[in-house]
């Protein structure tokens, strides 16, 4: 398994951990941003991350029937993890602001579903996936991500249900509560919800 030190080194080497002033898809502001797409642009390095994550998943969750990932960020990670665990892997997409299953995907009733993402900050996307799983009368066994950058006040799901390759303590701030040094840096909106 990759150590915390090795994981951080990979994130920095692939320029997946950025410094600046970022507005996250949650609307919170942060001095750092994790751009997993940069990590995923190096297949061997991202596979190392996913192998390590898969080992942790096997230890934590004994029974998984299917893996569900939110588009776009979770698709590649879900696929790699699904391949390593030999599990069916599907993804959901936003249509009119809500996650749905398309492309012939479905979840069989009473399935045990693992939700796999790239990064968890507030858990908003993961919870939207969980609501979708419930519609199919199935159960979420837990959540897995490459990077867990959540903090207690902003996290909407139970931290003990999350397995991650690396946990990063990155501060987040509300728009009206920014530190002076962060106010001086121009804002970047890097999240997928802001992409045109």
Image (cartoon, rainbow, N blue to C red):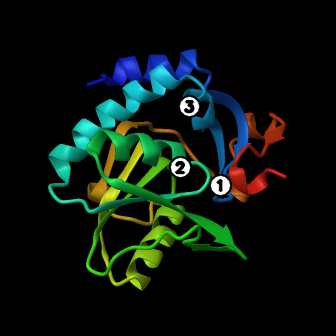
Disc 3 is placed on an element classified as helix
Q: Which mark is residue 40?
A: 3
Please name the residue shown 51% across and 52% down the image. 121
Sequence-wise first label, 2 or 1: 1
Report the residue marked by disc 2: 75
190 relative position to 67: left or right? right
Residue at the location (66% across, 28% down)?
19
The reply to whether discs 2 and 3 touch (Cβ–Cβ < 8 Å) is no
Q: Is residue 17 above or below residue 161?
A: above
Query: Which residue carries the number 1 mark?
Result: 28
Q: Is residue 196 visible?
A: yes
Residue 129 rendering spot, x and y as whole percentages: 48, 69
Image location of residue 100, percent across then percent down: 57, 74
Residue 148 is at least partly visible in this image = no
**Image side of residue 1 versus residue 23, left or right:** left
Residue 44 pos. (x, y %): 46, 21
Separation of residues labelled 2 and 3 (CA atoms): 11 Å
Whole-number angstrom distance, CA of label 1 to CA of label 3: 24 Å
């Amino acid at each position: 398994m990759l150590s915390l030190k090795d994981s951080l080194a990979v994130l920095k080497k692939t320029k997946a951990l950025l410094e600046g002033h970022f507005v996250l898809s949650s609307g919170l502001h942060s001095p750092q941003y994790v751009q997993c797409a940069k990590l995923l642009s190096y297949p061997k390095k991202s596979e190392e991350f996913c192998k390590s994550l898969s080992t942790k998943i096997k230890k934590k969750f004994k029974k998984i029937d299917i893996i569900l990932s939110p588009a776009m960020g979770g698709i590649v990670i879900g696929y790699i993890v699904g391949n390593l665990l030999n599990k069916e892997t599907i993804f959901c997409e936003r249509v009119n602001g809500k996650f749905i299953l398309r492309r012939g995907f479905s979840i069989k009733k009473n399935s045990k579903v693992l939700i796999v993402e790239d990064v968890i900050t507030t858990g908003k996307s993961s919870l939207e996936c969980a609501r979708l799983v419930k519609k199919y009368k199935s159960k979420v066994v837990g959540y897995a991500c490459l990077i867990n950058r959540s903090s207690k006040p902003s996290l909407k799901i139970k931290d003990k249900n999350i397995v991650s390759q690396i946990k990063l303590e990155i501060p987040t701030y509300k728009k009206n509560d920014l530190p002076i040094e962060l106010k001086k840096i121009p804002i970047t909106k890097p999240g997928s919800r802001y992409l045109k």
